[in-house]
């Protein structure tokens, strides 16, 4: 029999999936058994409110407050229900209850201010809006409403400043432009008012109040004919015409906030219009409001079950929310309704991708492209899916087809760049990334792709890397910075408990997951409170482990940067830690907004972010040796041991015997990805094989599943004077099987200039020594140097290429010593700082404390 907790979790699953009847029934049954269960009362009340049963919602939510008085959500949702019922005075009390528990709760502060205004308590409303804006300074609607309240109080001159701020935050909103213009008109500033009305009219030609206001201003400056014409247009407008609102929504699709206003009005006029709900969902999805999009699409398909477009759009919204299984159900229904629709097949492919089924996605795209062979975007996407399915050469062909149709297609350039990296064509990959950045200079993610690709190239200097990263900040970081003079409200107490937030889309089976797993539970809860902001759409076993190690787990998947920054600020984070840098799905534009007073980058990238809003780069003396600080924009914080600790692979098999035990041929190996195998690296390895005529080289990575990648790699070996018959290339292995492959190699070889990270640590855990080249000119060149030093193996670090060969060859000369090293490496690593989570947490917290004290000292009293 399920426990109450299990039943509540199931009810919540029904609720979130839109299965209203099932959720409603199960919440009711839970409350029959446990009528004082605050969580069940709250969630049932929320469901009632969402389904229009506001009286029931208010009753349930009031009970939730009674039995769970310490939960701000209970008070806020009660207030929302009471406000919707028109019981504004009671709503005010409920909002005040929420704010007593969570003074910086934005929705509670806004609701309170709005309710005070609604009941005519405008002085108090103005005070409430100012209190909200003290900690939510980018809340455009609050600035707008404060201005309107002040204007209603007869303080129009004072209203100009907040309305000006509202316009700055929402420059494409005709309503705020009009409010400011009307206020300027009221204080007698006709010229500025007319300019404001003109901007509003340009944004929304059918905004009747704009036309009227502009006409009034034109009259004041003597332009009688123009004023008369504007008044005439205003009179001819049909403010309640569904057709007009639908047409304007279509015309303004490139301005989704404005278009959404028209769709909302259209739905008020025609609430049973499934197409209108579908349009509402499209607009919400376009501006990143994934939950609103899901709800709108769900309403559309309830009204019109055979609406194929609504079904596939609902599938995509569910995919955006990290619910790919439910998305697949809807996508298959859509495909059944429209089996020959290329758009539906394309979107079904997107859902397959989210379920990690790239081969199926590629096959669906092949079907779609037979219907629309000139779809350049479709070819580019098929190329990406073929590449993910291991068919890299075919992926290149598809990307080339896309770019033949549209040479400036950003998706084609980006996807071809990744394919070319897999093939070892790094120079052409970088060229494609540069073309993509030039074609879409406002896309921060494309610029990040370029920066990451540059890290692999031995031709790019450290100075050039720094300059490129600074350019990213100039384009995408500094423009998002808070306004001058803005200050964080965090209490500047140098010794108080700190709130530390980690931000990542890689909280799972990823190097970040293995680095965090020993750290999170080891944090000293008396010193720090740990928040994790998860941008990963789906959980895995490692995700669940990390959730257990955090104090607070927040999902920011589907939240835009402004919303995520507001959440972080509302949580009162003191130190925000980036775990991605310029890798895929990073949130650096969020960090550019500076939602926390101290921001640091750690573990997820390979050097400077270039971001002026990033205060610190956490490293160690090996990753960032003395004298290297000028290569980064952040303050360098050096931990005493390694810059990471690691959870060793718990599923790793026992360390096997030396493969070359006795006098057998030695096998060298490298399991790093193909992109790291630079030409200088391959040239050095060819010299090693030529020095040891019986030795072999095993290279293993997922790219070698593709015959074209294998052929190019072996051709490169031949071109460098090597024997391809002594090189074995092996493709992908299941995650659980990969460690066992280390039992096939005697010595691991580290590539350069981009060194192995987690790969080196896994090799050591499997008893395989790793030979690395020290003294690299960039952060990513020194990963293995740091790991080997922390493991007590500095003798495996070569000062130059000749020393690299001597160390690698020397290890094979004494098989007994190599076997003994192999047998003891796991224990040696386990006893080292590499695997000591508490020690690492202590050092990292000391670094956080130093950064915090520095911020406190710099903060004006």
Image (cartoon, rainbow, N blue to C red):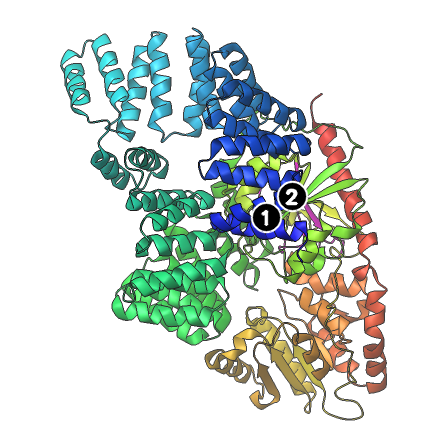
User: Which residue position is annotated with label 1?
Assistant: 609
- Closer to the chain start, of discs 2 and 1, is 1
**Circle 1 — which element?**
loop
Q: x, y (%) of residue 185?
A: 33, 11
Residue 728, quarter of picture: bottom right
Q: What predominant SS class does the magenta segment belong to?
A: loop
Looking at the rendered image, the quarter that the N terminus falls into is bottom right
Q: Is residue 838 above or below residue 168?
A: below
Q: x, y (%) of residue 203?
A: 29, 30
Residue extending furthest toward the bottom: 663
Do the residues bearing badges 2 and 1 touch, measured as CB atoms within 8 Å?
yes
Disc number placed over residue 809 in the picture, else none? none
**Magenta segment range?**
598-625
Looking at the rendered image, the quarter that the C terminus falls into is top right
Q: CA distance from mark 2 to mark 1?
A: 8 Å
* Residue drawn at (36%, 55%) of the image: 311
* Residue drawn at (30%, 13%) of the image: 191
User: Which residue position is annotated with label 2?
Assistant: 634
- Residue 460 covered by magenta stretch: no
Whether residue 823 sits left or right of residue 741 in the image: it is right
């Amino acid at each position: 029999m399920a426990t109450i907790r299990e039943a509540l979790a199931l009810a919540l699953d029904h609720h979130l999936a839109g299965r209203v009847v099932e959720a409603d029934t199960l919440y009711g049954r839970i409350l029959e058994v446990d009528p004082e269960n605050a969580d069940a009362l709250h969630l049932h009340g929320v469901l009632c409110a969402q389904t229009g049963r506001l009286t029931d919602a208010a009753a349930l939510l009031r009970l939730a407050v009674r039995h769970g008085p310490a939960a701000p959500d209970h008070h806020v949702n009660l207030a929302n229900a009471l406000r919707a019922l028109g019981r504004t005075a009671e709503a005010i009390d409920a909002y005040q209850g929420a704010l007593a528990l969570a003074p910086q709760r934005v929705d509670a502060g806004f609701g309170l201010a709005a309710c005070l205004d609604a009941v005519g308590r405008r002085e108090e409303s103005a005070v409430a809006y100012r209190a909200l804006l003290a900690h939510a300074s980018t809340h455009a609607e609050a600035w707008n409403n404060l201005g309107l309240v002040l204007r209603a109080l007869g303080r129009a001159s004072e209203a100009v400043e907040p309305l000006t701020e509202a316009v700055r935050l929402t420059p494409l909103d005709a309503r705020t432009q009009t409010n400011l213009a009307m206020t300027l008109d009221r204080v007698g500033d006709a010229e500025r008012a007319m300019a404001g009305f003109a901007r509003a009219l340009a944004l929304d030609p059918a905004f009747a109040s704009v036309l009227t206001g502009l006409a009034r201003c034109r009259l004041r400056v003597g332009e009688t004919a123009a004023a008369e014409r504007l008044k005439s247009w205003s009179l001819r407008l049909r403010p309640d015409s569904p057709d007009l609102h639908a047409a304007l929504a279509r015309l303004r699709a490139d301005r989704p906030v404005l278009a959404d206003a028209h769709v909302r009005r259209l739905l008020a006029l025609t609430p049973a219009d499934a197409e209108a709900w579908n349009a509402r969902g499209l607009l919400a999805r376009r501006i990143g409001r994934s939950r609103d999009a899901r709800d709108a699409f769900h309403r559309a398909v309830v009204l019109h079950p055979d609406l194929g477009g609504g079904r596939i759009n609902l599938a995509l919204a569910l995919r955006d929310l990290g619910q790919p299984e439910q998305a697949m159900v809807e996508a298959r229904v859509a495909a059944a309704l429209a089996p020959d629709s290329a758009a539906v097949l394309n979107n079904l492919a997107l859902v397959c991708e989210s379920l990690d089924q790239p081969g199926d996605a590629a096959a669906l795209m092949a079907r779609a492209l037979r219907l629309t062979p000139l779809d350049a975007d479709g070819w580019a996407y098929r190329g990406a899916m073929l590449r993910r399915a291991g068919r890299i050469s075919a992926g290149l062909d598809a990307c080339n087809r896309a770019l033949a149709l549209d040479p400036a297609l950003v998706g084609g350039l980006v996807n071809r760049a990744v394919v070319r990296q897999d093939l070892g064509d790094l120079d052409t990959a970088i060229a494609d990334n540069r073309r993509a950045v030039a074609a879409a200079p406002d896309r921060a993610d494309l610029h990040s792709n370029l920066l990451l690709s540059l890290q692999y190239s031995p031709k790019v200097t450290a100075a050039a890397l720094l300059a490129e990263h600074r350019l990213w900040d100039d384009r995408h970081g500094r423009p998002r910075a808070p306004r001058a003079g803005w200050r964080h409200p965090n209490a500047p107490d140098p010794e108080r408990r700190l709130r530390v937030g980690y931000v990542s889309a890689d909280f799972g089976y990823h190097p970040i997951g293995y680095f965090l797993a020993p750290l999170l539970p080891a944090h000293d809860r008396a010193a720090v409170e740990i928040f994790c902001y998860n941008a990963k759409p789906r959980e895995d076993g490692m995700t669940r482990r990390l959730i257990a190690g955090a104090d607070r787990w927040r999902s920011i998947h589907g939240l835009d940067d402004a919303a995520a920054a507001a959440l972080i600020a509302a949580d009162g984070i003191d130190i925000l830690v980036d775990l991605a840098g310029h890798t895929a799905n990073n949130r650096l534009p969020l960090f550019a907004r500076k939602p926390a007073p101290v921001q640091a980058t750690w573990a997820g990238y390979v050097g400077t972010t270039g971001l002026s809003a990033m205060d610190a780069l956490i490293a160690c003396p090996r990753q960032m040796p003395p004298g290297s600080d000028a290569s980064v924009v952040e303050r360098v914080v050096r931990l005493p041991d390694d810059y990471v600790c690691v959870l060793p692979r718990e599923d790793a098999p026992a360390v096997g015997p030396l493969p070359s035990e006795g006098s057998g041929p030695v096998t060298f190996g490298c399991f790093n990805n193909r992109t790291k195998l630079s030409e200088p690296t391959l040239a050095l390895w060819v010299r090693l094989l030529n020095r040891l005529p019986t030795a072999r080289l095993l290279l293993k990575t997922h790219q070698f599943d593709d015959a074209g990648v294998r052929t190019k790699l072996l051709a490169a070996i031949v071109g460098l004077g090597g024997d391809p018959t002594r090189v074995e290339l092996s493709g992908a292995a299941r995650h659980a099987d990969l460690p066992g492959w280390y039992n096939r190699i005697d010595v691991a070889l580290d590539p350069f200039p981009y060194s192995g990270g987690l790969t080196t640590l896994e090799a050591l855990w499997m008893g395989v020594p790793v030979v690395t080249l020290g003294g690299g000119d960039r952060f990513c060149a020194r990963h293995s140097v740091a790991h080997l030093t922390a493991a007590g193996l500095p003798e495996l670090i070569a000062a130059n290429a000749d020393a690299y060969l001597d160390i690698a060859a020397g290890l094979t000369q004494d098989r007994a010593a190599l076997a003994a090293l192999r047998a003891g490496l796991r224990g040696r690593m386990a006893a080292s700082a590499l695997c000591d989570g508490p020690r690492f947490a202590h050092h990292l917290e000391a670094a956080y404390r130093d950064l915090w004290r520095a911020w406190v000292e710099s903060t004006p009293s």
